[in-house]
Amino acid sequence: AALAWPNLGGDATYDDSSYEYLTAAEKETILWEKVQETAGTKGSFSPFRLLQMFSKDLSPTVDHYSDFIPYEGGKPFHSVGAVATVKFDTSDNNSTFTGIFAEGSHHGVIRLSLALGIANSKYVPGLALKFLRNGMYSANVMAMESIDGQESGNFFERDFSNHITEAKLFTRKILERKFARTYAPPGMVGLSDIASFTEQGSPVCQDEEPCDIVFPYELILKPNPMLREQFVDAAPSEEGLEELVSAIPAGTKLYDVYARAEPQDTDLIPLGTLETTSEFLYSKFGDNELFFRHQRITDDFALRPEWNTNQRRRGLRTGDNDSDSIKCPMLNRI
């Protein structure tokens, strides 16, 4: 049998599995045990695998709802990263947003990774975040600053967003053009799924009751200033990232989380904090099997159609017919 969930675009189905019916806490335990089983190992960056990506269908990136990768061979993009469990504390949140944005999450998984192998002295950090929910699929979001990268090896140097600045480097633009074929408009991932259900798996809107799913236009993650200062001299290398994450203990605040409610807003709304509940570990499970779905931004536009004609991408503004110029640098399998 297959399960289908309402209020979402795309083919929201996956194979019937007892895993999906577990609580968020039970699923977190399973995923973390799988990370620990292969701790100390990791995947690898492969230019050949990256080239193969151009002949592959990337639709599972947005249409696969499981926490487990539906393909073999590892991730061609964001191939190597470190995983930890996290909580999203929204106890001081007075916003009107719904679902996990309102109630927070005690059982989440975060993966810090580099988008590409170190090349031309560019270091391209990004993260994937998974909020586990009782009896249903997880909510996921990806965030970066830019696929063009930075000179320093300080993972916490810049703010991250689910809206990514457009690439300027020619080789990065080629990647973007491939990703753009998966859905339009790329360059942004959706947030409405996070707002649609609580961590307990309770839907914000019941079929018989009219209500609103309330979610922000953009999510901004601001690094903990102490981490930004601590790693200011980190080496821009894969080894440097390993040393960086190994120095972060459980109970560390990683990010302050803010929302931009509407495209035109300049004031940000504080939502809460992301804090580790474990150490960070490298593992082949995290690199080759753990999956983070990218939600289509068109799911958000279906609920807020006025946003579709007022796309604001960190300084880039476009109309409906410009999807070929808004390309998602993270829209592969993080």
Image (cartoon, rainbow, N blue to C red):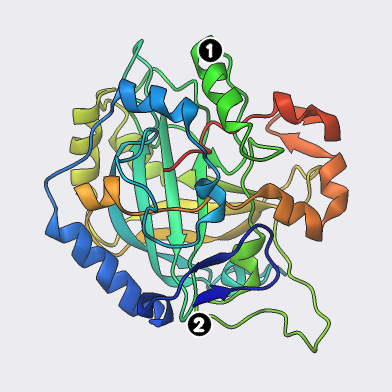
Residue at numbered disc 2: 200
Position of residue 236 in the picture relative to residue 50 (left or right) = left
Residue density around tag 2, few if under 14, some if 14–19, many if 20 or more, within 10 Å = some
Identified at 54% across, 75% down, the residue is 3
> Is 238 above or below relative to 206?
above
- Give the secondary structure at mark 1: loop
- Give the secondary structure at mark 2: loop
Residue 147 seen in this snapshot: yes
Q: Three-letter amino acid code at disc 1?
A: Leu
> Is 260 above or below relative to 228?
below
Residue 282 seen in this snapshot: no
Q: How many marks?
A: 2
Answer with the quarter of the image where residue 239 lies.
Answer: top left
Residue at numbered disc 1: 169
Residue 157, image x and y in percent?
42, 32
Identified at 25% across, 34% down, the residue is 241
Residue density around tag 1, few if under 14, some if 14–19, many if 20 or more, within 10 Å = few
Identified at 63% across, 29% down, the residue is 327
